[in-house]
Image (spheres, helix red, strand yellow):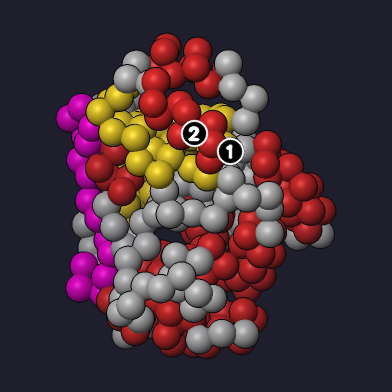
Amino acid sequence: MQIAWLFPGQGSQKLGMGKDIIELNDAKRRFDLASNIFDKDLYQICGLQTDNNSDEKSLNNTKNTQICLFLVESILLDSLKSKGYKPDYLAGHSLGEITALYAAEVLSFEDCVSLIKIRSELMSSAVKGSMAALIGFDIDELRKLVESLDDVVIANDNSSSQVVLSGKREELENLSKIISCKRFIFLNVSGAFHSHFMKEPSQKFSKYLDDLNFKEPIFPVISNSNPTLCSDPNELKIRLKDQMCNGVRWRETMDLIKVQGDDIHLVEIGPSNVLGGLAKRHLKNIMISQVSSAKEISY
């Protein structure tokens, strides 16, 4: 059986998700280390917070969401490793790609925390824009409409029945009035991520990555910008550089996983079942598990 570990990104966070993993080995030290680097109490934000407001201490603030998700996912995956579990390959959705690189031992925990601090700050400072999810649509109609607009792109090609668009709010609102789809949902994000609106942050992020040493992965990684199995550390760095400005090709990632064999087991490691839900709707006859808390360090 082929095992794929999957790591979700922004949108999968849950209030209080830190409480579910804080008693796991090394969790408290990691929260303390990351909190010192970010100069804020990250466990308060993702472990104890009950009212998800919109200020600097909100879990939905990009500066907090990314690091809190990484902390939860990295603690869970290392707990699985300590029990002898291991994947055949790894993939992560947007931020989750960084967790995948950590799981493959391409980057250290400390490198990832510092990298995510830079990434989240750059994304938060980008030109403002919006994102919207579409469910139940005709892909040919959608592509034609998107091509006719200057400031809307397909940011996340998630499955045959769901995509996420990025762009100017006004153009997205206009598109919502003419596209035929089951649902058109604006997302609670602070920018038009995975689009040309991220050009300047992406350039700065690339320069930061230039100084990081990417080690050879212990498991192959599937990247968002180029969904093929990769074990070349230099290529993995190039692909991560390309990620911020380019779409997340998740549908192709799932298709690639499916052709690896007839007996596939997807394990989503994170606070919710976003990626598992996409896989259930897109793939047939595939085994899916979720590891989201200290109570279920197994599959």
Query: Viewed as shown, does residue 116 lie left or right of 260?
Result: right
Is 141 within the magenta? no
Tell me the residue that label 2 is attached to.
Answer: 172
The residue lying toward the viewer, choosing from 177 and 181, is 177
Decide if residue 236 is on the left or right side of residue 180: right
**From what the image shows, is residue 46 above or below residue 211?**
below
- Kindly state the secondary structure of the residue where label 1 is placed: loop
Q: Are circles 2 and 1 on residues that touch, CB within 8 Å? A: yes
Separation (CA) of disc 2 from disc 1: 6 Å
Seen at 39% across and 26% down, the residue is 177
Which residue is at the front of the view, 3 or 127? 127
Q: Residue 86 appears at what percent x and percent y?
A: 37, 55
Quarter of the figure that contains the N terminus: top left
Residue indicated by mark 1: 168
| Start-end of magenta stretch | 280-296
Residue at image x 20%, y 40%? 287
Q: Position of residue 281 (x, y in %)?
A: 23, 32
Amino acid carrying label 2: it is: Leu
Does any portion of residue 114 appear in the rendered image?
yes
